[in-house]
Amino acid sequence: MKKHQLDTPALVLDIDILDENLRKMRDLAAAAGKKLRPHTKTHKCTRLAARQLEMGNCAGVCAAKLSEAEGLVKAGIGPVLITSPVSTPQKIRRLRELAGQAPGLMVVVDDLDNARMLDGAMESVGRLDVLIDIDPEMGRTGIAYDQAAAFAGALKNIPNLRLCGIQCYAGHLQHIADYGERRHLTLERMRRAAVLKKELGVEILTGTGTGTADIDIEIPELTDIQVGSYCVMDSEYTFIGSRDGEENHFFRPALTLLCSVVSRNQRGFVTVDAGLKSLYFTPHAPPRVIMDGVMRADYNYDWFGDEHGKLCFPGEKPALGTVFELSLPHCDPSINMHDRIYVVRADEVIDTWPIDLRGMAQ
Ligand SMILES: Cc1ncc(COP(=O)(O)O)c(C=O)c1O
């Protein structure tokens, strides 16, 4: 079947572009002596996670949530690092179960009370490996740099936890358009994390994202990069400046959304079958129509409620059922709205991968 024969809305993944992105990130990391720890929050698909591991040079994978980690372990994917604190009593009970089945499982901590709860849960099970989550002045999770040494000292006295390293993820810097500014800010954050790693004498310094990976790998103490979006590549990321120029085309968008015309009775636009329930709302960077591999500036997509979108363009209205291909400015939350990804090679559908971790928000 050709991709344009798929029913819509449908997520379509170009396998050759995906593999090119996976290879490029693997080689970028390897050349700097770093490992990858791909973040599976981006795609929530164990088939894709397995492909990332097969590409090689991985220290493991990341999960944002405990339930994602459970899904990965069930699919035989690991070792898994959970990059957000696991703090509710229900989840801590599940984490204890998971630890028994998941060699190399690690979780971040940023609070002594949480560490004590984890310690209690791990009693008689064995030691749980933890990383200190550093807050690189993003203010989401993590502990301030200047409190980390004291926190690490306290953790060393907690018998059922083993401190393996630190995590430093500066999400707020990833999309800074000016390359020089992004570089300056991320190196400043990462250098402080590197100093801390040396001070604590720990094994791991993990962090970074697609926007700063090529910069952060210059830090000698960084051991692995927990990049997510690069594999399917948000089209939004292509508009931030790179080392080489105003746009960033090193990784290429591999994932698009097909939609089709469901109504054309209005003047000046047609209505398509992709709205808020299949395409994440990014009003600052709307999806673009792609034709023959080119993003068209003369076609405008806008969300038109939950199930529909509005497509404006000059010229004749297309027939009902005409299929359009849209770019995905931010893939991660859009993927989470679908059951499967259609895998294509040169427009031929060659496979279907279930998005088996979708909805796993706990
Ligand atoms: C903790 C953490 N690490 C890594 C990433 C990956 O970032 P990116 O998708 O920009 O590669 C994310 C993404 O949100 C994240 O939350």
Image (cartoon, rainbow, N blue to C red):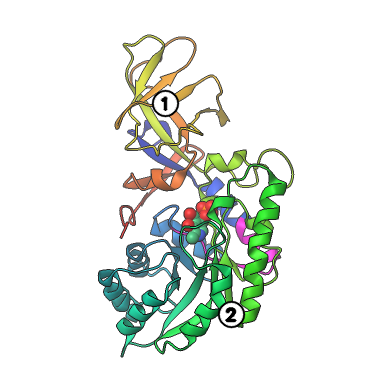
Which image quadrant for residue 35? bottom right
Disc 1 element? strand
Mark 2–mark 1 distance (CA, rounded to whole Å): 48 Å
Q: Is residue 305 left or right of residue 53?
A: left
Relative to 3, does residue 169 appear above or below in the rendering?
A: below
Q: Residue at x 43, y 48 (%)?
A: 332
Residue 346 location (% of width, % of height): 51, 39
Residue type, label 2: Glu
Q: Secondary structure at mark 2?
A: loop
**Is 238 positioned to the left or the right of 337 in the image?**
right
Indicate the amino acid at tag 1.
Asp
Instruction: Please give the name of the residue rendered at 31% of the width and 78% of the height, measured from the top-left corner.
Output: 96
The residue lying toward the viewer, choosing from 336 and 132, is 132
Nearer-the-camera pick, 284 or 30: 284
Residue at which label 1 appears:
302
Report if residue 58 is visible in the image: no
Total label count?
A: 2
Tag 2: Cα neighbours inside 10 Å, few (<14), some, or many (≥20)? Answer: some
Residue lying at the far left of the rendered structure: 90
Q: Residues within 10 Å of mark 1 (few under 14, many from 20)?
A: many
Q: Which residue is mark 2?
A: 203
Residue 329, given in percent of the width and then of the height, sits at: 49, 39
- Residue 124 image position (x, y, % from top left): 31, 90
The answer to whether 134 is drawn above or below residue 248 in the figure is below
Q: Is residue 13 magenta?
A: no
Query: In this orientation, which residue lies closer to the viewer: 76 or 65?
Result: 65
One can see residue 199 in this view: yes
